[in-house]
Image (cartoon, rainbow, N blue to C red):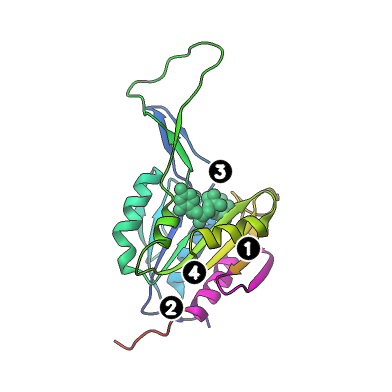
């Protein structure tokens, strides 16, 4: 497995944070830098796949040969993912999607008011869960960013979102998760198997994820 093993496959990767606007100058977001998702996109391309990278705002350049679609909000990401999913054998959802957005985006900058202020939020669509409900599902890989009970919460997401594989990472560790070049992860699979990946670069972890995907994909029909 590795060189060329994803030739003939189209892989979608989502990466980075989403931004949910409050007013023209403010937004809700998170610490995702996009590095983990971009590493998966780059590695999949190097292994021969056609790669569609749906990216939230990051400071990263698109990896060579990857088709990048830039989005801002969770709803933008949902639209881009759902438009292209039919082309894809695999979807890897590395993006840190905001679970909530402001109930209303103000057209004018909100003025400073009393000592306290309350912001009403509404739930964003769960893109991964929507993919899990598709009749013709691609091979679906989710991530789980947790700060406690890593395996338990990740296993729940794997089952509830109807995934083939989940990559669980403990984002409370200094050398893993958000905004660093390294990560450590636990892979859980639909068939109940598991694999632990110790501390390594995000590039290497991306390849470990793709090793699992490549070995579990149905063989490509000759064209
Ligand atoms: O970008 P980096 O700085 O390199 O950091 C990498 C990372 C920590 C962002 C990455 O490794 C990671 O854990 N990504 C998933 C972050 C996340 O949002 O996890 P979650 O447990 O909240 O979501 C579970 C899964 O559902 C994820 O695959 C997520 O993309 C998806 N989801 C979540 C909410 C939502 N509304 N729609 C979704 O599709």
Q: Which mark is residue 6?
A: 2
Q: Which residues are magenta?
A: 189-216
- Percent coordinates x, y for residue 199 in the rendering: 70, 63
Label 3 to label 4, Cα distance in Å?
A: 23 Å
Residue 59 seen in the current view: no
Tell me the element at label 4: helix
- Percent coordinates x, y for residue 93 in the rendering: 47, 59
Lower position in the chain sequence, tag 3 or tag 4: 3
- Residue linked to disc 3: 31
Magenta includes 215? yes
Tell me the element at label 1: strand
Label 3 to label 2, Cα distance in Å?
A: 30 Å
Label 4 to label 2, Cα distance in Å?
A: 10 Å
**Residue 81 or 180: which is nearer the viewer?**
81
Lower position in the chain sequence, tag 3 or tag 2: 2
Q: Is residue 56 above or below residue 104?
A: below
- Residue linked to disc 4: 43
Residue at 31% in and 68% down = 87
Of circles 1 and 3, the one toward us is 3
- Residue linked to disc 1: 201
Label 1 to label 3, Cα distance in Å?
A: 18 Å
**Residue 216 or 129: which is nearer the viewer?**
129
Of circles 3 and 4, the one toward us is 3
Q: Is residue 47 above or below residue 198?
A: below
Tell me the element at label 3: loop
Label 1 to label 4, Cα distance in Å?
A: 12 Å
Of circles 4 and 2, the one toward us is 2
């Amino acid at each position: 497995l590795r060189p060329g093993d994803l030739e003939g496959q189209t892989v979608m990767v989502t990466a980075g944070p989403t931004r949910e606007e409050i007013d023209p100058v403010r937004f809700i977001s998170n610490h995702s830098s996009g590095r983990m998702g971009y590493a998966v996109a780059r590695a999949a391309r190097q292994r021969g796949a056609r790669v569609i990278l749906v990216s939230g705002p990051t400071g990263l350049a698109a990896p060579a040969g990857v088709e990048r679609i830039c989005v801002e909000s969770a709803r933008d990401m949902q639209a881009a993912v759902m438009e292209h999913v039919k082309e894809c054998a695999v979807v890897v959802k590395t993006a840190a999607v905001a679970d909530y957005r402001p109930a209303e985006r103000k057209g004018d900058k909100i003025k400073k008011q009393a000592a306290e202020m309350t912001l009403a939020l509404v739930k964003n669509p769960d893109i991964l869960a929507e993919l899990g409900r598709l009749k013709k599902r691609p091979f679906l890989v989710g991530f789980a960013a947790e700060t406690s009970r890593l395996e338990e919460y990740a296993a729940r997401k794997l089952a509830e979102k109807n995934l083939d594989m989940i990559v669980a990472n403990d984002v409370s560790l200094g050398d893993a998760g958000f905004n660093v070049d390294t990560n450590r992860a636990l892979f859980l699979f639909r068939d109940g198997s598991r694999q632990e990946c110790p501390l390594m670069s995000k590039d290497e972890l991306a390849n470990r994820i793709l090793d699992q995907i490549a070995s579990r994909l149905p063989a490509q029909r000759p064209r």
